[in-house]
Amino acid sequence: MASEEAECISNLFKPIYLKEVAELRQYVPNLQSRPNPLDHNPYFDTRQLQQQQGFYLTESDVLLRQIGNDLSPSPRFAYHRAGPRKNIYFDPSIVRVAIVTCGGLCPGLNTVIRELVVGLWQLYGVRHIFGITAGYRGFYSSVPLPLNPKLVHHWHNVGGTLLQTSRGGFDLHNIVDAIQTHAFNQVYIIGGDGTMRGAVKIFDEIKHRKLEVAVVGIPKTVDNDVGIIDRSFGFQTAVEMAQEAISAAHVEAESAVNGIGLVKLMGRSTGHIALHATLSSRDVDCCLIPEIDFFLEGKGGLLEFLGQRLKENGHAVLVVAEGAGQDIIPRTDSQKDERDESGNPVFLDVGVWLKSELNKWWKREHPNELFTVKYIDPTYMIRAVHANATDNLYCTLLAHSAIHGVMAGYTGFVAGPINGNYAYIPLEDVARANNPVDTQDHKWSWVRSVTNQPDFVRR
Ligand SMILES: Nc1ncnc2c1ncn2[C@@H]1O[C@H](COP(=O)(O)OP(=O)(O)O)[C@@H](O)[C@H]1O
Ligand SMILES: O=P(O)(O)OC[C@H]1O[C@](O)(COP(=O)(O)O)[C@@H](O)[C@@H]1O
Ligand SMILES: [Mg+2]
């Protein structure tokens, strides 16, 4: 074997299971296919490209989910690659599109809407595109908003969602009735884990009624709590914004005698924003996330650690994800049961609680020494900005992937990036998959080595 050549390290047979997504023709009888109108789009010139192969994707174009390989014979999964297909199953002249945004804000929402509108209009010649306003409830409670490329032209430069969003208001039968009443046959649902669970129910009901309606989910989660996909759009922008808050906390802490800069970041059940912001900032002394329990008092606790940091450095920076420590913050019975309109638990402000506990501790231990906690809560600022360049590009590829999949007759799927490429994933799989920070792998040890924080194990 020549040294430049790769060494064969395994000839083990590893089964690969293709995760098929549903297709409209499976339950709509006599569905006719037609050539993709991209064949006649002057910008794509597919007739020339087809001779070179590769423009249109086929059933055999798949992406592997697990690209890291442990050489064991455990099964692997693959998904269909996203992109245009040679034949489509919709006549663009009778396509009626509904686009809805649900749940909390995330940078890039408006870019996804813009690119859906522009993509449908320019790639496939669709002319009947509507925005459903204010989340799921908008299907049955307000008049759909007609959208066109001119109207959405500048939307990628604006934070939030110009269609508006809301929590709650999921009324399955009213939603599907409204889809029928308005004769929508393509429904693009942009939202997080809760939204995707709702989308599965809409898809099931549409199948049950045998409607010629394609449903596609576009995952949005500033917390990055949706699994399978690499990451959500807007996440990188949020991490970038979080840096500014951490820098400010660092400046405040360093400029005070015994100063603590405390930053609360979003992350209901996952600490991804806090973790990524901590690793990229280098100024953080301790990062608290929902996946790790911590305690204040005693050996190995947070107060002992911060006391040491103040002694050594004169200041400390503490980053906390909003979902961290929720089970140790004292709460009343009514606070225990509080839920938002979607049914998500309402958290107490961990930052306010920590600030108060830190002040009590210092007063008790060092009554005559200066001490300051500067608490920064940038949470809404982080998710209300427009997407950065990387996320804007991601949103565009995502929207176009969704359009190509729907046009090709796929339904009940999510368009999303897998290992850097775009794939079609069954909606149900995405709705079921969460994405906690893995605190067992070496990356969490790396975080601890960057911050020097304790492991919060009582000994
Ligand atoms: N299990 C569920 N079944 C149906 N609809 C749901 C479910 N969970 C949430 N929803 C609906 O999805 C929408 C968004 O959910 P929410 O949890 O607020 O945000 P996100 O989708 O960002 O996680 C809301 O309208 C909510 O009523
Ligand atoms: O105050 P709101 O709008 O209910 O949103 C707060 C929640 O929204 C989020 O930013 C995103 O949550 P979702 O992805 O479920 O919408 C959470 O981090 C946060 O807990
Ligand atoms: Mg959610």
Image (tube, rainbow, N blue to C red):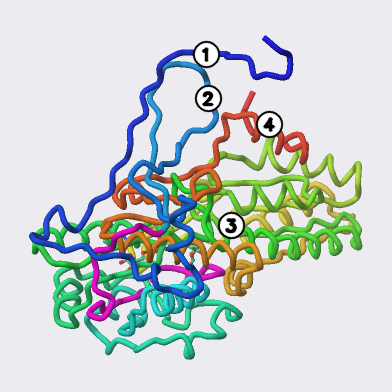
Name the residue that disc number 4 marks: 445
Which quadrant of the figure has residue 300? top right
Q: Quadrant of the N terminus?
A: top right
Side (left or right) of 136 relative to 57: left
- Compare residues 331 and 103 and report the one nearer the observer: 103
- Residue 69 numbered mark, or none: 2
Name the residue that disc number 3 marks: 350
In space, the residues marked 3 and 1 are separated at their CA atoms by 50 Å
Part of the protein shown in magenta: 84-108
Q: Earlier in the sequence, mark 3 or mark 2?
A: 2
Q: Earlier in the sequence, mark 3 or mark 1?
A: 1
The secondary element bearing badge 4 is classed as helix
Kindly check if marks 2 and 4 are in contact, taking CB atoms under 8 A apart as contact.
no
Going by the numbered disc 4, the residue's amino acid type is: Ser
Going by the numbered disc 3, the residue's amino acid type is: Val
Name the residue that disc number 1 marks: 10
In percent of the image, x 19 and y 58: which residue is there? 24
In percent of the image, x 13 and y 66: which residue is there? 211
